[in-house]
Image (spheres, rainbow, N blue to C red):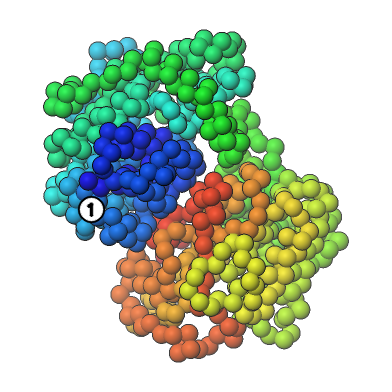
C-alpha cells in the first residue's frame, strides 16, 4: 500500500506520518509538502531514514509536479492535509488560502482521476459549520449541519469540501471527508493557542488572549485524530463525511489559566487583546456517526492530553525555539502586538509612478506603515485610480543627482528603502545617445541611494532582472549564481546596480524578477489584449522561456521581506511553471475571451528587437521558501485577477 500524505511536514500531517509508519510498517508513505512557514522538515527527522518513507518538496497547486509524483509512486490512497490554516492570516491575505485550499485540492483530485486511486481523503475542519451559541450547550455539529462559514479560511475549506463531493458525484472519484475539532499535541506550530501559550509562559512573555477569552473549542488530541483517519481511509463509506471530535469543550481563557498552573506561572502574564474579526464563539462536534459506523471514540481526555503536550514542549525546546527565532517572531509582533497601534516602520519608495512602485506604496498603506514615494515628475504621475498612493507623501527626486538623493533620504530618515525606479526600455537603451543616461539611472542612481542607506544604516531593496545572465541554456538561474554575462545595455547597467548595492551594504535584498505586469503603466498583457481586439492574427515568440510577475503580488512579498532581516539575493516571479511568450498569449486570450489566431514564431523569425533577448529567463525561486517567505500565487491566477482589476 502506498499513501501520499500532503502537508506531512505540518502539525497533524507529521503526526499522521509517524502514526501510519508505526501502525502499518509495510506501507510506503510519501510526504508531499511545500514547506511554507508552518511546514518544518526537521519535524520529520525521526523518519527520514526509514526506507518506507519518502519526502518530496512540492506544491499541491503545481500540476506538473503532482502528476510526476503520481507517475513515480502510483499511490493507492491520498490523504490531503495540505492547507493554509490560520484564521488571522486568511483575514489579512485571503488569496493564498483560496489558491492552496481550493485550487490545490482540485489539482490533487485531477491527479487521482488521471492515475487512479482507491481513496482520496480530504482533511477538513469543523469551522465550515460556523459557530454555536454559548447558551445552548445541548447543540452540536453533526454531518447534517448546514455550512455557514465565518472567515476566508473556513470558506476556502468549505469550498474544497464541496468540490470533493462534486468530484465524487460527477466523476465517481472514491472520496471521504473528515471534519475535526481543534487539535493539540506534539509538533504544533507555535502560532496556535496552546503551543503559543506554552512557549510564551516558559519565556515569561505576555499571553495574548482574544477578547475575554470566552470562546469555546472542542479539543482533540492529535493521535486520536490520526487513528480516526486511519479507520476512515480503510473502512469509511465512499462519498461520506465524518465528524471527528474530542468531547473536550474548554474556554480559551480556562486553557491559558490551566497552562499557567501546570507551568507554575502567574496569571498576570495574561494580556487581553482586541478580538479578531468574525471570531466564532463555540465549536462542538458530535462524533456519533464515526463511532456508530467505524467504532471510533476519542481516547485522550483533555486533562491528560494537555499534560503530555506541555511535557513534550518542555522536552523539545530546541524544536520550537528554532521556529520562534525565525519568521514567527515577526508574525507574532504583527498579529499580537497592540492591534490599535500603527507600526513605526518608515519606508522610502522610488519609482512610484511605475507599475511596482505604485503597488508597493498601496501595500504599505494597507499594512499601516508610513511610506514616502518619489519619482522624477514634480507630482505623482501614475494612474489616478484613487488608491492610497495617489494621496500619500511624495517628493520629486532625480536619483542621478547624488546631492539631491542624500538630502531627500536623509531628511526622511527611513527604516527601509525599496528602490523600484529604473530605466526599463530595453531596446531604447541600445541607442548610443542613451547609454550614458541609462547607466546614470540604473547604476549611478542606485549607488547614490546605497551610499545614503549605508550612512543611515537602513535596509535597501533593489529590484533587478534575469537580464544580468546570458539567457542561454535551459536550467533555471539560481539566486546566488555569479556567472554574470549580460546580453545588452539594460542588463549590464542593472548588474552594475546589483554590485553597487552588494558591495556597499550588508542589509540588502536584491530581488530579480521577469516579465512584469501591473495596473499602473504599459505591459505585455495590455498590449496583447489591444492587438487581439484589433487584429485577426498575431505572431508571438515561442523560444523565450520564463514566468510572469504580477506587481500586486510582488509588492506583498517585498514588504514581507522588509519585516525580516533575512537579507541576500532572491528570485521572485509568480508560481505556475515556466512558459513561453506564446503560451502566455494563449492564456491571455483564453481568459479574455478573444478568438484571435496566434502564430508561434522563433525570436529570429520575429525580428524587430534592437537589444538581444534572453531565451532562458527561468528563475529558481526555491530560496524564498527556504527563507520562510510565502511564494507568489500562480501566474494563471494572477492573470485572472489582473484582467478583472484592469477591466480588460
Q: Is residue 539 left or right of residue 290?
A: right
Q: Is residue 421 left or right of residue 621?
A: right
- Check the picture and name the quadrant holding the C terminus: bottom left
Residue visible at 23% across and 37% down in the picture? 177
Q: Is residue 426 left or right of residue 17?
A: right
Q: Is residue 331 or residue 421 the one in the foreground?
A: 331
Q: Is residue 317 left or right of residue 62?
A: right
Can you give x and y, in whole percent of width and height, for residue 270 in the image?
Answer: 56, 16
In the image, is residue 385 above or below residue 499?
A: above
Residue visible at 20% across and 32% down in the picture? 231
Residue visible at 35% across and 47% down in the picture? 51
Quarter of the view holding residue 119: top left
In the image, is residue 178 above or below residue 531?
A: above
Can you give x and y, in whole percent of width and height, for residue 224 in the image?
Answer: 30, 25
Can you give x and y, in whole percent of width and height, for residue 576 in the image?
Answer: 41, 60
Name the residue tied to disc 1: 112
Quarter of the view holding residue 438: bottom right
Residue visible at 42% across and 44% down in the picture? 48
Please indicate, yes or no, whether residue 611 appears anywhere in the rendered image.
yes
Q: How many marks?
A: 1
Q: Is residue 131 or residue 506 the one in the foreground?
A: 506
Please indicate, yes or no, whether residue 289 appears anywhere in the rendered image.
no
Circle 1 SS class: helix
Amino acid at each position: 500500500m502506498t499513501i501520499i500524505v500532503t502537508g506531512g511536514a505540518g502539525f497533524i500531517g507529521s503526526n499522521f506520518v509517524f502514526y501510519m509508519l508505526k501502525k502499518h510498517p509495510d506501507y510506503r508513505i510519501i510526504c508531499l509538502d511545500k514547506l511554507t512557514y508552518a511546514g518544518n522538515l526537521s519535524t520529520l527527522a525521526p523518519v527520514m531514514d526509514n526506507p518506507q518513507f519518502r519526502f518530496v518538496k512540492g506544491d499541491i497547486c503545481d500540476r506538473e509536479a503532482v502528476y510526476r509524483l503520481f507517475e513515480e509512486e502510483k499511490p493507492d490512497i491520498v490523504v490531503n492535509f495540505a492547507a493554509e490554516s490560520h484564521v488571522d492570516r486568511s483575514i489579512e491575505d485571503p488569496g493564498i488560502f483560496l489558491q492552496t485550499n481550493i485550487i490545490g485540492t482540485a489539482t490533487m483530485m485531477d491527479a487521482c482521476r488521471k492515475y487512479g486511486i482507491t481513496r482520496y481523503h480530504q482533511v477538513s475542519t469543523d469551522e465550515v459549520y460556523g459557530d454555536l451559541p454559548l447558551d445552548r450547550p445541548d447543540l452540536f455539529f453533526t454531518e447534517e449541519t448546514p455550512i455557514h462559514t465565518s472567515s476566508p479560511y473556513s470558506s476556502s475549506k468549505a469550498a474544497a469540501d464541496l468540490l470533493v463531493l462534486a468530484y465524487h458525484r460527477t466523476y465517481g472519484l472514491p472520496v471521504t471527508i473528515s471534519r475535526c475539532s481543534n487539535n493539540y499535541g506534539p509538533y504544533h506550530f507555535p502560532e496556535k493557542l496552546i503551543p503559543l501559550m506554552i512557549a510564551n509562559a516558559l519565556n515569561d512573555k505576555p499571553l495574548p488572549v482574544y477578547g475575554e477569552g470566552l470562546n469555546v473549542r472542542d479539543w482533540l488530541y492529535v493521535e486520536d485524530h490520526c487513528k480516526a483517519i486511519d479507520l476512515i481511509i480503510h473502512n469509511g463509506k465512499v462519498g461520506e463525511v465524518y465528524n471527528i471530535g474530542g468531547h473536550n469543550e474548554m474556554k480559551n481563557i480556562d486553557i491559558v489559566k490551566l497552562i499557567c498552573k501546570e507551568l507554575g506561572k502567574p496569571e498576570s502574564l495574561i494580556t487581553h487583546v482586541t478580538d479578531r474579526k468574525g471570531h466564532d464563539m463555540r465549536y462542538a462536534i458530535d462524533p456519533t456517526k464515526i463511532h456508530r459506523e467505524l467504532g471510533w471514540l476519542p481516547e485522550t481526555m483533555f486533562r491528560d492530553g494537555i499534560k503530555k503536550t506541555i511535557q513534550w514542549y518542555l522536552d523539545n525546546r530546541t524544536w520550537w525555539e528554532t521556529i520562534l527565532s525565525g519568521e514567527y517572531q515577526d508574525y507574532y509582533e504583527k498579529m499580537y502586538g497592540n492591534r490599535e497601534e500603527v507600526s513605526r516602520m518608515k519606508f522610502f519608495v522610488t519609482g512610484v509612478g511605475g507599475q511596482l512602485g505604485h503597488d508597493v506604496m498601496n501595500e504599505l498603506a494597507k499594512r499601516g506603515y508610513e511610506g514616502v514615494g518619489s519619482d522624477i515628475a514634480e507630482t505623482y504621475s501614475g494612474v489616478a485610480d484613487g488608491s492610497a498612493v495617489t494621496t500619500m507623501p511624495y517628493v520629486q527626486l532625480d536619483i542621478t543627482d547624488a546631492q539631491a538623493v542624500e538630502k531627500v533620504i536623509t531628511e526622511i530618515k527611513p527604516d527601509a528603502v525599496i528602490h523600484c525606479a529604473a530605466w526599463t526600455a530595453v531596446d531604447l537603451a541600445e541607442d548610443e545617445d542613451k547609454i550614458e543616461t541609462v547607466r546614470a539611472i540604473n547604476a549611478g542612481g542606485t549607488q547614490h541611494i546605497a551610499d545614503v542607506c549605508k550612512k543611515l544604516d537602513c535596509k535597501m531593496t533593489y529590484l533587478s532582472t534575469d537580464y544580468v545572465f546570458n539567457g542561454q541554456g535551459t536550467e533555471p538561474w539560481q539566486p546566488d549564481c555569479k556567472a554574470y554575462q549580460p546580453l545588452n545595455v539594460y542588463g549590464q547597467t542593472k548588474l552594475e546596480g546589483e554590485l553597487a548595492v552588494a558591495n556597499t551594504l550588508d542589509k540588502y535584498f536584491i530581488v530579480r524578477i521577469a516579465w512584469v505586469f501591473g495596473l499602473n503603466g504599459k505591459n505585455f498583457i495590455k498590449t496583447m489584449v489591444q492587438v487581439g481586439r484589433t487584429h485577426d492574427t498575431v505572431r508571438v515568440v515561442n523560444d523565450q522561456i520564463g514566468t510572469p510577475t504580477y506587481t500586486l503580488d510582488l509588492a506583498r512579498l517585498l514588504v514581507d521581506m522588509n519585516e525580516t532581516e533575512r537579507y541576500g539575493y532572491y528570485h521572485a516571479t509568480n508560481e505556475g511553471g515556466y512558459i513561453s511568450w506564446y503560451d502566455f498569449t494563449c492564456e491571455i486570450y483564453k481568459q479574455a475571451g478573444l478568438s484571435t489566431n496566434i502564430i508561434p514564431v522563433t525570436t529570429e523569425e520575429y525580428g524587430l528587437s534592437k537589444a538581444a533577448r534572453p531565451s532562458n529567463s527561468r528563475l529558481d525561486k526555491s530560496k524564498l521558501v527556504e527563507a520562510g517567505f510565502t511564494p507568489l500565487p500562480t501566474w494563471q491566477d494572477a492573470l485572472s485577477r489582473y484582467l478583472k482589476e484592469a477591466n480588460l
